[in-house]
Image (cartoon, helix red, strand yellow):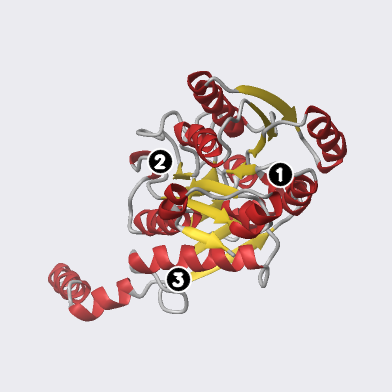
Amino acid sequence: MGQVLRRQFLMAASALLASPLARAQQARKIQRVGLLANLPRPPNAAAVRFLDAIRLGLQEAGYVEGRNLVIDARWETKIDALSQGAADLVNSGVDVLLTFTTPATRAAAKATHAIPIVFSMVSDPIGSGFVTSLARPGRNITGVTNAFPKFSGKLLELVREVVPGTRRVTVLWNPDNTGKALDFKALEVAARELNVMLQSVHVRAPKDFAAAFAKVAQDRPDALITLADTVTYRQRNEIAAFAISHRIPTAFNHLRHTEAGGLMSFSPDNSEILRRAGVLVGKVLGGARPADLPVEQPTKFELVINLKTAKALGITIPQSIMLRADQVIE
């Protein structure tokens, strides 16, 4: 009799689990995403834009905060603090780690080999050792890279269109960033094709900019290209002000530099990158393995022109460029 009752109980339990009510209860399971970002916390504008784009991607994947999702965020502006932030999130038992920038991803990768990690805004995931290849990440990490090196050469083409006769271009960049090294190589290829001479000026920390600006002012290049990363991004206002004061046309691979006073930028659509990262997090929460999810690359790019800066430099932007611009700052 005991075996019969046990069998009847198991049958009833199976029927209950298969019922619409049980499925609805399972669907309402609260998933926890641990967010580790190398950014100031909200209401910082960059952090707000980041969260808005991530939430949009998560929503597309079926996950909404307050309904079936909780986002536990750690905002760390100091790289040294990222390791502790990652450890806190791992110890709290999050289901997925979502990282923003290479330093944040490195901290997360050191903190866990078990919890899935989805990165965003990482320039060189292979060179950084996060994945074995873009097509087959191979471990607990995948994400969306913001690098598409061949498009860095497009910056040089745009400079030649906006400033005809350009022959000497200085590139301001951080050589410690492997992703920027790939971008610089793409610029070198484009420079050879366009018969342009590149001058490389390195900046690794804020203290390097005074000497870098002095070098650029002494060389008087026809244009200045800045490769955006954490170091140059945080000095974007100073870079723009310096270039305008010395009447040097500028081009960037991040639109915020143009908003800060740069002449123009051609860059991946960062909101789209972050949205796609949110979608990937949703796939992982749904059971997909990061090792099986290829690293995604940018598919949308934005050309932004700052007409106010053009006027200050005495430059007339060609109509062909204006027609292709995604955004014009006046």
Front residue of 23/297: it is 297
Element at badge 3? strand
Along the viewing direction, whichever of 305 and 179 lies nearer the viewer = 305
Whether residue 307 sits left or right of residue 296 in the image: it is right
Q: Position of residue 131 (x, y in %)?
A: 47, 33
2 vs 1, front mark: 1
Residue 227 falls left or right of residue 116: right
Among the two numbered marks 2 and 1 on one chain, the one whose residue lies closer to the N terminus: 1
Residue positioned 35% across, 33% down in the render: 135
Q: Is residue 220 above or below residue 259?
A: above
* CB under 8 Å between discs 2 and 1: no
- The residue drawn where x is 75% and y is 47% is 239
> How far apart in space, not on screen, are marks 3 and 1 (Cα)?
35 Å
Dot 1 amino acid type: Thr
Corner quadrant of residue 275: bottom left
What element does badge 2 sit on?
loop
- Name the residue nearer the viewer: 140 or 265: 265
- Foreground label between 3 and 2: 2
Residue 116 visible somewhere in the drawing: no
Residue 273: where, in percent of width, then height? 45, 52
Quarter occupied by the C terminus: bottom right
**Disc 1 residue crowd, few under 14, some 14–19, many 20+, Cα 10 Å:** many
* Left or right relative to 207: residue 35: left
SS class, disc 1: helix
Whole-Å distance between the Cαs marked 3 and 2? 24 Å
Question: Which quarter shows the N terminus?
Answer: bottom left
Q: Which x, y percent locates residue 293?
A: 35, 43
The residue wearing badge 3 is 69
Residue at 80 percent of width and 39 percent of height: 205
Q: Which mark is residue 232?
A: 1
Q: What residue type is labelled 2?
A: Val
